[in-house]
Amino acid sequence: MKKLSARRRHPLAALVVLLLALACTGGLYAVFAPASKAQADETAQSLAIDEGKKLFAVGCASCHGTGGQGSSDGPSLVGVGAAAVDFQVGTGRMPAQQPGAQVPRKKVIYTQAEIDQLAAYISSLGAGPSIPTEAQYGPDGADIAKGGELFRDNCTQCHNFTGKGGALTHGKFAPSLEGVDPKHIYEAMQTGPQNMPSFPDTTLSEQNKKDIIAYLNAVNGDDTVSPGGLELGGLGPVSEGLFAWIFGLGALIAVAVWVAARTAKAKKS
């Protein structure tokens, strides 16, 4: 009887064994599952970099060097980041057709998947600004009035008050911002393409950039109505006043000359 009692298991022994089994299973999942996901992400990133390198060799290396180090025909791309690639290639500015004072926007020749691969390769050369998410440039939580104030303080010198663009020196120009993808506007502020200065988060915060984009969407949107009639490029009262003086006063002078000529002819006859 004593021997049988010694072999009898405690009532909680089965519960303890079950808990240990669950703990071991959870521990194994915690060890192996995240590692598998991380390994898959790393593999996908490596494949994107490899494909991006191939695209770079065909379409970009002739100007920017085989390793993106730059040449006499193109600047170094080390450290420019994925945002610069997404902006330049996503707006068709790159690859450039020919050298000049400024590379204009043109038709995009790469798919977004290929642009992402190019961006992954350039990012592997050196850290730089990343491609923004929709939450960063979307309209949710934006202050349009604040955006207008920021735009007038930082951008109107080149792009004019409503982002219609304008001429600069030596054949350069500030492009129109009408109809530009909000993501590309955000990336331009991040990276400072061509003649534009960069506005990192230390200069214009993420919220500031969102506000500016919301302002541009408001003044150039399809539902925007100009209460003043003809906008004259959105240059403001100076251009409108100049238009009135040149064309309005010119028309009055022309009418006066015509009346005087008709009167003189009538007197002679």
Image: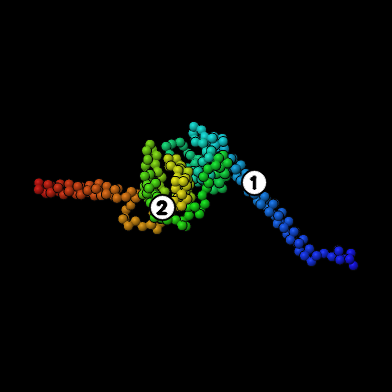
**Among the two numbered marks 2 and 1 on one chain, the one whose residue lies closer to the N terminus:** 1
Q: Are marks 2 and 1 in contact (CB under 8 Å)?
A: no
Q: In the displayed image of the protein, which residue is found farthest to the top?
A: 72
Classed neighbour count for the residue bearing mark 1: other residues with Cα under 10 Å, few (<14), some (14–19), many (≥20)? few
Where is 54 relative to 23, above or below? above
Label of residue 215 in the image:
none
Q: What residue is rendered at 45% in x and 36% in y? A: 99
Q: Amino acid at mark 2?
A: Gly
Q: What residue is rendered at 49% in x and 52% in y? A: 136
Residue 262, percent from left and from top: 15, 48
User: In this view of the protein, can residue 108 be seen by the observer?
Assistant: no
Q: Please state which of residues 103 and 80 is positioned toward the viewer in this rendering.
A: 80
Please indicate whether residue 138 sits to the left or right of residue 26 in the image: left
Q: What residue is rendered at 31% in x and 55% in y? A: 229
Residue 169, percent from left and from top: 37, 38
The quadrant of the image that shows the N terminus is: bottom right
Distance in Å between CA atoms under marks 2 and 1: 41 Å
Q: Please state which of residues 257 and 94 is positioned toward the viewer in this rendering.
A: 94
Label of residue 43 in the image:
1
User: In this view of the protein, can residue 9 be seen by the observer?
Assistant: yes
Q: Amino acid at mark 1?
A: Thr
Residue 115, percent from left and from top: 54, 45
Residue beneath label 2, please?
147
Q: In the displayed image of the protein, which residue is found farthest to the front?
A: 2
